[in-house]
């Protein structure tokens, strides 16, 4: 039998190609999408656990729980052999194989508080401040520079506790630390959406507010000296109390701070967590200190008193074997307008979660920079549903209701 080898070779290639296409198609069909959503709760108090780190260990996908303790992941069946790990300062970490979880179902995850008591560290206030100053300097030196921080940003405006405006988007920040520790930053917005829901008009209300928190400048908190309790030039205005505890076999400093009495220039109190061995700052929570509300600045404008009634700042850092960088920032402010013709409370909240970091070939942006204060001003400019990325922090319930009304669901 005569065989046309060239023809046979051609047919063989066609068969192989079709088999490969079939195998790929079957593999893609097998990798069906799954959703794992959960709620993190304190074992004793049954209260939500905010800003916990949620991570798939093998695929290195990470996210965080929001202020209501909620988190969510979208993944394929390819990830089902992965392990979900939840860590949070003050709690024992948990590891759960995905194959043991209820896929496409909502699940409560309970974290047990770390039972190791805080030990008082016998350190004078001066030396406590020295430890803090050393941690600030070491943390700053570990920041990659120059670098491009890629992330997801969202902002919202509430009027009298009613959510009126919302915007979110994918952003990139170019950050470069100068010799004098000043920061050069540029912002580029890749995708965005914005919406305002109509509310009943009231003669003595203002509806025109966008966020007062600048999308350009929220990244400034990468420079820790931008936060007054971490600015060594302002240490004299605060009282610092330092303690130490062991968590996951690692010694950690906790520094509680509050404004000194009769101090009118500073208002924030809170706590700082520092890894004792590396001297890297892990987390920072700042809130209006108890009893210091009277120190918040007010001023009058055309017969209306404008007062800051709340101020909150939460920052989380991520430390791996070879890297240390900013992970998450949440900043919020409450402002009260009061007078004969106006009585209104506005709340402004912004969040930024860093999803990727580029340190190679990082250069200032040559075009497309965004210079407006509010992301809302950019409006709807998106080409895909970027908000479905599993790395992103979920919306809180009020935002979810807002978005459902927005989409008409």
Image (cartoon, rainbow, N blue to C red):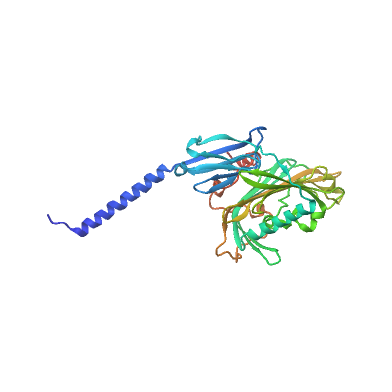
Left or right position of 360 against 121 = left
Q: Quadrant of residue 26?
A: top left
| Residue found at x 52% / y 43% | 74
Left or right position of 209 against 97 = right
The location of residue 280, given as percent across then percent down, is 66, 53
Near-viewer residue (2 or 343): 2
| Residue found at x 71% / y 52% | 213
Residue 116 shows in this picture: yes
Quadrant containing the C terminus in the rendered view: top right
Residue 204 shows in this picture: no
Q: Quadrant of residue 359?
A: bottom right
Near-viewer residue (124 or 382): 124
Residue 46 lies, with reference to residue 198, above or below; the image says above
For this orientation, the residue located farthest to the left is: 1
The image shows a total of numbered marks equal to 0
The location of residue 114, given as percent across then percent down, is 65, 38
The location of residue 173, given as percent across then percent down, is 62, 59
Near-viewer residue (32 or 124): 124
Quadrant containing the N terminus in the rendered view: bottom left
Residue 16 lies, with reference to residue 246, above or below; the image says below
The location of residue 283, given as percent across then percent down, is 67, 49
| Residue found at x 31% / y 50% | 18
Near-viewer residue (362 or 12): 362
For this orientation, the residue located farthest to the front is: 122
């Amino acid at each position: 039998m005569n065989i046309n080898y060239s023809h046979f070779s051609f047919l063989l290639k066609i068969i192989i190609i079709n088999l490969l296409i079939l195998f790929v198609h079957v593999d893609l069909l097998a990798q069906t999408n799954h959703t794992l959503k959960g709620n993190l709760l304190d074992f004793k108090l049954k209260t939500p656990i905010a800003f916990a780190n949620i991570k798939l260990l093998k695929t290195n996908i990470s996210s965080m729980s929001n202020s209501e303790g909620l988190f969510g992941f979208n993944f394929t069946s390819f990830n089902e052999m992965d392990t979900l790990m939840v860590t949070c300062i003050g709690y024992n970490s948990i590891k759960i194989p995905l194959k043991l979880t209820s896929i496409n179902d909502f699940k409560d995850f309970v974290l047990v508080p770390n039972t190791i008591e805080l030990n008082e560290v016998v350190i004078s206030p001066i030396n406590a401040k020295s430890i803090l100053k050393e941690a600030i300097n070491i943390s700053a030196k570990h920041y990659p520079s120059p670098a491009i921080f890629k992330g997801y940003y969202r902002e919202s405006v509430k009027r009298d506790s009613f959510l009126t405006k919302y915007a979110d988007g994918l952003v990139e920040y170019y950050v470069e630390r100068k010799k004098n520790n000043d920061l050069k930053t540029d912002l580029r917005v890749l995708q965005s959406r914005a919406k305002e829901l109509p509310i009943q008009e009231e003669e003595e209300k203002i509806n025109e507010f966008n966020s007062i928190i600048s999308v350009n400048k929220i990244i400034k908190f990468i420079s820790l000296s931008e936060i007054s309790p971490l600015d060594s030039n302002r240490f004299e205005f605060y009282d610092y109390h330092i303690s130490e505890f062991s968590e996951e076999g690692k010694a950690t400093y906790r520094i509680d701070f509050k404004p000194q009495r009769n101090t009118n220039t500073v208002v924030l109190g809170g706590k700082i967590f520092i890894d004792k061995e590396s001297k890297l700052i892990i987390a920072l929570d700042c809130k209006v200190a108890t009893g210091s509300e009277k120190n918040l600045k007010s001023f009058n404008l055309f017969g209306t008193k404008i007062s800051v009634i709340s101020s909150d700042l939460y920052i989380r850092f991520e430390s791996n074997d070879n890297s240390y960088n900013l992970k998450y920032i949440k900043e919020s402010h409450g402002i009260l307008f009061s007078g004969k013709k106006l009585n209104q409370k506005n709340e402004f909240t912004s969040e930024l979660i860093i999803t990727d970091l580029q340190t190679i070939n990082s250069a200032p942006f040559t075009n497309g920079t965004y210079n407006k204060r509010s992301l809302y001003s950019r409006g709807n400019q998106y080409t895909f549903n970027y908000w479905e990325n599993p790395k992103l922090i979920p919306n809180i319930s009020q935002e979810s209701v807002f978005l459902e009304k927005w989409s008409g669901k």
